[in-house]
């Protein structure tokens, strides 16, 4: 079973990627495609040196500018399809360090379950900073990661009106189905791409991974989380830099792009797949935005960000990508 890993890097992150590459080489990866998404020349020079050190395995592609995660992974996967012969693809973020037998666990599970190459199936490595995925399989609730139907940016008024009834988790469950997945850790046969297509580059940033992976579920396929295949995140994701409330992420970044695209794309994804009652959805939106306004008023130094959030809401509601 031959595997090609695909990762996308940007900015000054060569120091992170170096650790990931070393881990992949140790794990016995057959090929590694690194897409340099418009990083500075100094960073790219480090990547070139890294490529020279592993020239028999590492394939380096440079893009002139940062074209977003969707296009970055698209370019990487297209390179595998057009230039390499490896049967399987393992998507990783540039800070996803696979632990020990992470890759071997995926291979063994795939072989033991005799998944055919034309079946709409993918496996997912477990990332310790994303416990919701393990909770989803241990409570046998594949959609738990996404929240309730008609939620607005993950918020549902039901969660305010009544206490949540927690489903008891079964800690003995180590593998199970989840409805969506991030890019980082997703493992599949290359033929899957002919069934679900490539990432939608109109997303640019944020939400493109869920849109891409949910196509598997939407085709009555399955994504199985393999909790023994562990990936360590060397850096915490923007979406995970939050506390109990989803809006806290807006106060933890000064990036207009991060705020705008996370809002716009989140709304587009919800509307496209999970809104079954517009009345409930827009009620959730109104309450969410009212509560968000209160939060911004309590932290006035962040008020300029509210305009960016509202711009993202408007674009998402209008269906713009």
Image (cartoon, rainbow, N blue to C red):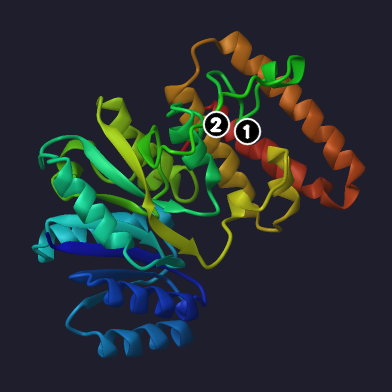
Question: Is 282 situated left or right of 173 in this image?
Answer: right
The label nearer to you, 2 versus 1, is 2
Foreground of the two, 66 or 115: 115
Q: Indicate the secondary structure of the residue bearing disc 2.
A: helix
> What residue lies at 50% left-to-right and 27% top-to-bottom?
270
- Can you tell which mark lies on residue 39? none
Foreground of the two, 177 or 241: 177
Q: Residues within 10 Å of mark 2 (few under 14, many from 20)?
A: many
Residue under circle 2?
A: 267
Residue under circle 1?
A: 313
Q: Residues within 10 Å of mark 1 (few under 14, many from 20)?
A: many
Residue 141: image location, x then y, percent: 46, 26
- Residue 93 appears in the figure: yes
Q: Is residue 44 above or below residue 304?
A: below
Foreground of the two, 11 or 25: 25
Q: Earlier in the sequence, mark 2 or mark 1?
A: 2
Instruction: For marks 2 and 1, give the CA distance.
Output: 7 Å
């Amino acid at each position: 079973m031959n595997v090609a890993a695909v990762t996308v890097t940007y900015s000054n992150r060569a120091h992170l990627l170096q650790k990931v590459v070393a881990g992949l080489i140790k794990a016995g990866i057959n090929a590694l495609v690194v897409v340099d998404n418009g990083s500075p020349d100094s960073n790219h020079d480090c990547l070139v040196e890294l490529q020279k050190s592993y020239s028999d395995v590492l394939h380096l592609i440079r893009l002139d500018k940062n074209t977003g995660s969707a296009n970055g992974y698209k370019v990487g996967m297209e390179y595998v399809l057009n230039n390499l012969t490896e049967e399987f693809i393992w998507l990783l973020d540039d800070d996803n360090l696979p632990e020990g037998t992470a890759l071997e666990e995926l291979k063994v599970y795939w072989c033991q379950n005799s998944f055919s190459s034309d079946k709409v199936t993918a496996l997912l490595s477990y990332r310790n900073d994303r416990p919701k995925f393990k909770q989803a399989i241990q409570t046998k609730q594949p959609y738990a990661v996404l929240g309730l139907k008609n939620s607005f940016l993950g918020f549902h008024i039901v969660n305010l009106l009544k206490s949540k009834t927690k489903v008891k988790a079964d800690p003995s469950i180590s593998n199970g189905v989840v409805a969506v997945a991030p890019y980082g850790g997703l493992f599949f046969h290359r033929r899957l791409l002919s069934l679900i297509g490539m990432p939608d580059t109109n997303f640019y940033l944020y939400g493109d991974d869920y849109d891409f992976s949910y196509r598997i579920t939407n085709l009555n396929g399955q994504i199985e989380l393999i909790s023994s295949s562990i990936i360590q995140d060397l850096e915490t994701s923007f979406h995970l830099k939050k506390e109990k409330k989803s809006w806290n992420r807006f106060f933890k970044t000064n990036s207009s792009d991060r705020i705008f695209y996370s809002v716009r794309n989140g709304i587009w994804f919800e509307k496209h797949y999970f809104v079954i009652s517009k009345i409930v959805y827009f009620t959730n939106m109104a309450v969410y935005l009212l509560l968000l306004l209160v939060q911004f008023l309590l932290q006035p130094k962040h008020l300029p960000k509210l305009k960016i959030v509202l711009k993202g809401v408007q674009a998402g509601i209008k269906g713009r990508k």
